[in-house]
């Protein structure tokens, strides 16, 4: 009877209901927590997706099927590891085979000495016997470091030398030292090749690059290049205007004609550029330009004509085109003496103009049969300046250059990822709005809650 009396009491019933409700809510929260451990989702609501990995990186991580370990050597007291730690968490989230840890080299000098660490901010990536290092890594560096350690060996890229080509050793404006550095950053071995001293193009050559020659190639050199194509080799031709007519004739054998003109683009002036630096913002569908939405610049370029009468086993596709306001200027004297250009109907070619094209050559004994032979791949640009030290890092030039090389080397997993824009969107408040933001959460809302509590207590007392 006493127990029944206790539970018949209104306060006791209310307390029992409250306890049951609390237990149910706690049970639900525990269940949600348990589910979220195994099945959790992340959402990035930032405008530029600063806290998300690129599609290219996700593709790479999906291909990782063995353990990859990263050791980041950062000084704990500096607090500079925060951004990298957030990035590595994203990598780990996408693929559990990726592991990372942070080590303070001052507190663990033995491990730092083992890895030869001399600078803070060095991250070592390991998989099996392979190792790669980055300093203060961005997404592109981290992703390509992972690619380096999960792949075996390096592919060799040869730059032709001996005809006034762009020099990969010089840091001058027209040099290619930055291009060399970018290729080495993607695990390529970069070499120079003097064909006059060679009997053939080296067997380890994944790509031969002919970049801005100013003198004609010898007939013996052309034969070696042709033999390389017949064996299924890959080539990148970067041929500037008004140069090497012999090489122009050579490329006509592969359904390409390098026009004897200079592309003029008046639209460039709207963006503060020179009319001899065409802007390209749209590209033909191709593996090189897939998901490529970045503008590129081609200073002092010539146009390319695709010969319609196709030869057996040769396929030619345009890759990059100028806009319809451009044209191919053929009056060289007017450009040099007056610095002016004017479209002449009948002489000049109106845009859009192709300034980069892809050639696929089927080789071998069965090249005239469908599906026979091995493909040789070539990409031809009417300009070499877009990848020199002055222009390589301008907008999308580096991305296009590297994507082209990676396609030629059949290493499309190697990527160039542009850093995400860091939006700075400060909230500017008036003095009145500042007062509102202070008083509403600090005084008004707590005051209303306090007032509501006083009213409830007053009503309860009045009823009693």
Image (cartoon, rainbow, N blue to C red):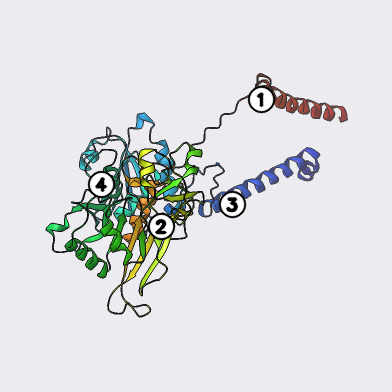
**Residue drawn at the location 21% of the way across and 39% of the way down:** 113
Residue named by callout 1? 437
User: Where, by quadrant of the figure, is residue 357 drawn?
Assistant: bottom left
Under circle 3, the secondary element is helix
Q: Nearer the viewer, mark 1 or mark 3?
A: 1
Q: Are marks 4 and 1 in contact (CB under 8 Å)?
A: no
Which percent across, then down, holds residue 48?
52, 42
Q: Nearer the viewer, mark 4 or mark 3?
A: 4
In primary-sequence order, the first of circles 1 and 3 is 3
Q: Are marks 1 and 3 in contact (CB under 8 Å)?
A: no
Residue named by callout 4? 166
Q: Are marks 4 and 3 in contact (CB under 8 Å)?
A: no
Q: Is residue 201 visible?
A: no
**What is the C-alpha distance between the residues marked 2 and 4?**
23 Å
Residue named by callout 3? 31
Q: Please tell me whether residue 204 is drawn above or below residue 433 in the rendered image.
A: below
Q: Please tell me whether residue 162 is drawn above or below residue 408 in the rendered image.
A: above
In primary-sequence order, the first of circles 4 and 3 is 3
Q: Mark 4 Cα within 10 Å, few/some/many (few <14, many 20+)?
A: many
Residue named by callout 2? 288
Q: Are marks 2 and 4 in contact (CB under 8 Å)?
A: no
């Amino acid at each position: 009877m006493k127990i029944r009396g206790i539970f018949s009491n209104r306060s006791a019933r209310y307390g029992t209901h409250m306890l049951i409700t609390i237990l149910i809510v706690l049970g639900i929260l525990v269940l949600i927590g348990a589910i979220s451990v195994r099945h959790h989702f992340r959402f990035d609501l930032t405008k530029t997706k600063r806290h998300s990995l690129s599609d290219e990186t996700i593709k790479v991580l999906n291909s990782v099927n063995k353990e990859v370990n990263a050791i980041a050597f950062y000084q704990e007291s500096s607090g500079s590891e925060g951004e990298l730690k957030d990035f590595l968490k994203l990598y780990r989230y996408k693929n559990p085979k990726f592991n990372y840890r942070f080590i303070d080299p001052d507190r663990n000098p033995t491990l730092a000495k083992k890895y030869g660490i001399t600078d803070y901010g060095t991250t070592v990536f390991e998989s099996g016997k392979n190792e790669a290092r980055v300093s203060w890594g961005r997404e592109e560096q981290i992703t390509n470091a992972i690619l380096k350690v999960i792949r075996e060996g390096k592919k060799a890229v040869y730059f032709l030398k001996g005809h006034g080509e762009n020099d990969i050793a010089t840091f001058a404006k027209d040099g290619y030292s930055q291009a060399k550095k970018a290729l080495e950053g993607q695990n390529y071995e970069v070499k120079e090749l003097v064909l006059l001293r060679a009997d053939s193009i080296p067997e380890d050559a994944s790509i031969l690059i002919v970049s801005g020659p100013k003198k004609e190639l010898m007939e013996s050199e052309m034969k070696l290049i042709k033999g390389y194509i017949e064996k299924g080799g890959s080539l990148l031709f970067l041929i500037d205007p008004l140069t090497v007519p012999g090489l122009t004739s050579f490329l006509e054998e592969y359904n390409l004609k390098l026009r004897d003109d200079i592309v003029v683009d008046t639209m460039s002036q709207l963006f503060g550029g020179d009319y001899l630096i065409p802007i390209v913002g749209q590209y033909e569908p191709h593996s090189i330009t897939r998901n490529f939405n970045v503008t590129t610049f081609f200073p002092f370029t010539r146009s390319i004509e695709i010969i319609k009468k196709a030869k057996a086993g040769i396929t030619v596709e345009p890759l990059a085109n100028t806009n319809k306001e451009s044209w191919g200027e053929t009056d060289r004297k007017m450009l040099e003496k007056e610095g002016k250009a004017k479209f002449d109907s009948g002489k000049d070619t109106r845009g859009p103009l192709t300034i980069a094209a892809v050639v696929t050559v089927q080789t071998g004994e069965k090249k005239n049969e469908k599906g026979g032979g091995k493909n040789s791949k070539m990409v031809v640009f009417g300009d070499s300046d877009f990848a020199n030290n002055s222009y390589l890092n301008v907008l999308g030039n580096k991305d296009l250059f590297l994507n082209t090389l990676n396609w030629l080397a059949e290493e499309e997993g190697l990527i160039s990822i542009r850093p995400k824009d860091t939006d700075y969107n400060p909230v500017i408040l008036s003095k009145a709005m500042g007062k509102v933001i202070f008083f509403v959460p600090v005084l008004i809302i707590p005051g209303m809650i306090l007032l509501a509590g006083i009213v409830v207590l007053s009503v309860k007392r009045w009823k009693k």
